[in-house]
Image (cartoon, rainbow, N blue to C red):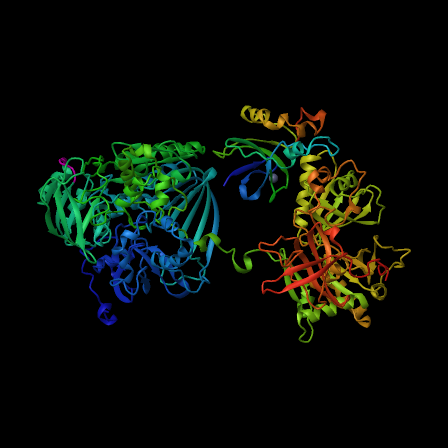
Amino acid sequence: MVSRSAASGSPQTQRQRAVARIDQNAPINFTFDGRSYRGFAGDTLASALLANNVHLVGRSFKYHRPRGIMAAGSEEPNALIRLGKGAYAEPNLRATQIEIFEGLYAESQNRTPSLKFDIGAINSVLDRFFPAGFYYKTFMWPASMWMRYEHVIRHAAGLGKVADDHNDPDRYEKTHAHCDILVAGGGATGLMAALQAAKSGARVILADEQNEFGGWLLGEADIKIADVPALSWVSDIVTELAAMPNVTLLPRTTVFGYLDHNYLTLNERVTDHLPSRPAHLPRQRLWKIRAQQVIIAQGAHERPLVFAGNDLPGVMLAGAVRTYINRYGVCPGQRAIVVCNNDDAYRTALDLHHAGAYVVVTDLRATATGPLMRAVRNAGIEILHGHAIIAAYGTHRVARVEIAPVDDSVTAITGDIDHRDCDLIAMSGGLSPAVHLHSQARGKLQWDDAKLCFRPSATHEPSFNIGACNGSFDLVAGLKEAVRAGTKAAAATGHKATTLDTPDVQIHKQSWRPLAAWKIPNGHASGRGPKAFVDFQNDVTASDVSLAAREGYQSVEHLKRYTTTGMGTDQGKTSNINALAILADALGNEIPAVGTTTFRMPYTPSNIGAIAGRDIGDLFDPVRLTRMDDWHRAHGATFEHVGQWMRAWYFPQDGETMQQAVNREVKAARTTAGLLDASTLGKIDIRGRDAAEFLNRLYTNAWSKLGIGKCRYGLMLKDDGMVMDDGVTTRIGENHFHMTTTTGGAAGVLDWMEEWLQTEWPDLEVYLTSVTEQWAVATLSGPNAGKILQDAGIDFDLSPAEFPFMSMKEGHIGGLAARIFRISFTGELSYEINVAARHGLALWTRLMAAGKAYGITPYGTEAMHVLRAEKGFIIVGQETDGSVTPHDLGMDWIVSKTKPDFIGKRALARHAMEYDDRKQLVGLLCSDPATVIPEGAHAVLDPNQPLPMKMLGQVTSSYFSPNCGRSIAMAMLKGGHALKGQTVFFPMLDGSVLKAEIVDTAFFDPKGARIDG
Amino acid sequence: MLIITCPFCGPRDEVEFACGGEAHIARPLADNKISDADFADYLFMRDNPKGLFLERWRHSAGCRRWFNVARDTVSNEIVEIYPMGSLPAKTAAKTTYKTSWRRDTAAEKAATPSRSKAGGSK
Ligand SMILES: [Zn+2]
């Protein structure tokens, strides 16, 4: 271990020179794997580590091989980092995208105990046991063994660990926006297109994943645009765009999803780059943007070359090396070998040379000519044409390579092997357009045989691909496309501007036709010799791909899943084309014939916190409170969630248990009076000429003749004949009804009624209004209910003759206007008192005051359930589950035989409804009166039958009933109605067996003698 | 996410809507004499085509009104939006309606003999 103090001043030995993007006057201290380092403002974690000559930054997924920094952008497959501590820790972040800040704390991943000594690396030696399809093959071992291996494998193979504290302390926001034109990517072409579009007055949003605009130009040194250095041209355009009111610039914002109808999702990293996050700003912001037109300017990804040892730290993409030199002033090595199949890497050779490195170019092509090659030769750089790196070696960093001459198709070694020492390999296998967004939006791709890449053909959504992501790698061609796309997109949104001139570009002329060389020979048979990686993040080698082909995998979609190529968090940005080409080669097929996989969102991994935004904790779902809620809280109620409602569950007194409290409440309701807050019941106001006829069709029973001021219980079915809701509906006037629904079913019932009115019976004139929240409801129930109402100041005669059961009267209680319904869910004399919501608490306190002398007892939903179960009343959703008919419930009496139609009528006549093994509602009395059979317990007729036992059905409601002095239960049992009097058994998890007699469901006052008090 | 143009409110995001499934399933009259199997065509059988589909949508977080949508399930292109109780006017959507297997079912015939022209709206 290296001590901290010695390390804190560690020199940035690889920092070569001053560059504009790095502020050498602003040093920044950070920690990586417990060691302190220093970088500068403008660095990424990757560039700062490279400046300190740190290449080894992680261990690979499967083999735990040492891995370094390969790229300079979001395509990085190797350098995945765990950032931050405690609850702030976040795994699997790409070091190439992390802007460093003072105090940054980062750790490498997937290594035990340390990066340099990792016991998991034994996997690399045991690689014969980790071939392609390893996971699938493992399933073919005895299943019992898999259970054991899985544990080991899941720990050995994997990425970073999430934060130990799962309560993310950061805040995330979501925002919605509309624009005429969204430009995804702020490189040269994206900027040009945005400017062209913005000049027309169209509303433009320009987003780029980097911290500043400029794209790949940020990593170049020798390009001039419009006679000024490329980055001056960039900053002029950015300044111009920033000043335009119709333009929104979003740096540090990744367009990660492209969905139907030009709907795009963006992740803005608002404060990730700051040492501390200001309270008024979120950490990240999720943008949901609807654009009329989209211009995709995503750029391209450089491909690695597939040679043995290509995954060693110090083996980098040639373009990335250029970026580290030019943008960050860091030269990642002193003895560099450039290996390539194309012209572009020669520019890296030049920049390495100018940065002071010793450079050799190994060009797979037998010949290559042009100004770039001339410039390299004139600089005195050695060029080996027709040569390849056939293997690279090193322990924690590349140290040595084997170079050999190869034939024209790069399939065979044709001469002696030359050994060279080196500390850096800059590889280039050509460019792959970033077609991800285009592909997410279901755009089509075509194979370009000259440029050796897939590029967009037809778009599916209104969009344009421009520049490198369109396969137009040449800057001038890209800028021309940008002007064209900007003009066309603006025109499509009804805007027009003078066409901008495409600026002059000064850059070395080069060819964009790489040599097709997908797998570099190493003199060994496939599967032997050192590994040549295709997918670095998922540890997939060239021989894995060949093996898959030999085993019969011909489709790229199958190959992908079998080998896991392209299934890492990088989605194979650097690996897909190489894998495809090697598969095509193994199958003796053309690349386009093998096909390509579909890219799906997200383009880069997106933080779940940003997707959740503020919709967490208390803001996850609205909470609905009744008007009496304050009283309940003040009187110690416990609560339960019923849908969004918070309902008082029970009111414990003086250290009562729940059972004690519920027993007391249930008893009070039958001996004196109980008071229930029933405000949450769904209430629908129904009016119109055809209101009664509508109810006739909606409910199973008849409604036409219901008198004004009378109430009726109704059962609502779906059209398949199954019970969906129940409740009491009251006729307020000739064409005016007041419907109640279950608390949970209220919204669904209203939607259901609207659906039938609008789609099936538009000829009916009926108007529906939800009035659930307009009324507060207190249910007063018990033998003393009438007296209490009297004392509370009711202004009409309560005698049963004047105010019979199942009727409604309007009047006043202590001056509060009320609708009082004489309906009962307890079987006791009961009044459901509805007042204007604002009077709810006043009503409640007046009733409590008037009832004090009688011992009035507030009760909650639990006592309500026990009271109704004592009477055998069902609760829809508890006794029923969407497969229960009225007959199953023993409620044939409520189904009209004479109505021509109601919803569910025809379905009830189906033959299947007559099967005698349908589950039917019964009552149960446990042989032990003190035992409450658990709800959900399954009944069997013979507890000694062999397994699996024949199930009869399940217990749906089960309580201790203080009024019956014993336990009671309801159950849905197959053929239950015919089983009355028989005994059923309930085998319990602990091996015991409960026994119960099947009885009627009315446990208490079966004759209904108590209804008038 | 789709943009759906509510005939009453205008273009809105899909999140404001609820899809009500296949359109133009005529409901047999309750006293029909069709077999259970034929009735099942109405009650249970739902199309799930690759291509143009006539379906019902409701502006659930807006005006709460129902309407019909002709949508291509492959491209998600919305070809036509038309009111409840009416038939599509665009040729492709018309063809989809006319060539549906439902037009020949006993369930549809039992919906109402006189309604064959207007077409069931549910
Ligand atoms: Zn609407």
The C terminus of chain A, quarter of image: bottom right
Q: Is A825 situated left or right of A492 in this image?
A: right
- Residue A627 visible in image: no
Q: Which residues are magenta?
A: A364-370
Q: Is residue A56 above or below residue A692?
A: below
Quadrant position of residue A481: top left
Of residues A728 and A524, the one drawn nearer to the viewer in this rendering: A524
Residue at the extreme right of the image, as rendered: A801
Seen at 44% across and 58% down, the residue is A281
The N terminus of chain A, quarter of image: bottom left
- Residue A984 visible in image: yes
- Residue A948 image point, x, y percent: 58, 54
Q: Is B7 situated left or right of A756 in this image?
A: left
Q: Is A612 situated left or right of A333 in this image?
A: right
- Residue A980 image point, x, y percent: 75, 55
Question: For ligand 1, which image quadrant applies?
Answer: top right
Q: Is residue A610 magenta?
A: no
- Residue A243 image point, x, y percent: 38, 45
Residue at the extreme bottom of the image, as rendered: A654
Q: Magenta-highlighted stretch: main secondary structure?
A: loop
Of residues A150 and A62, the one drawn nearer to the viewer in this rendering: A150
Quadrant position of residue A106: bottom left
- Residue B102 image point, x, y percent: 62, 28
Quadrant position of residue A206: top left
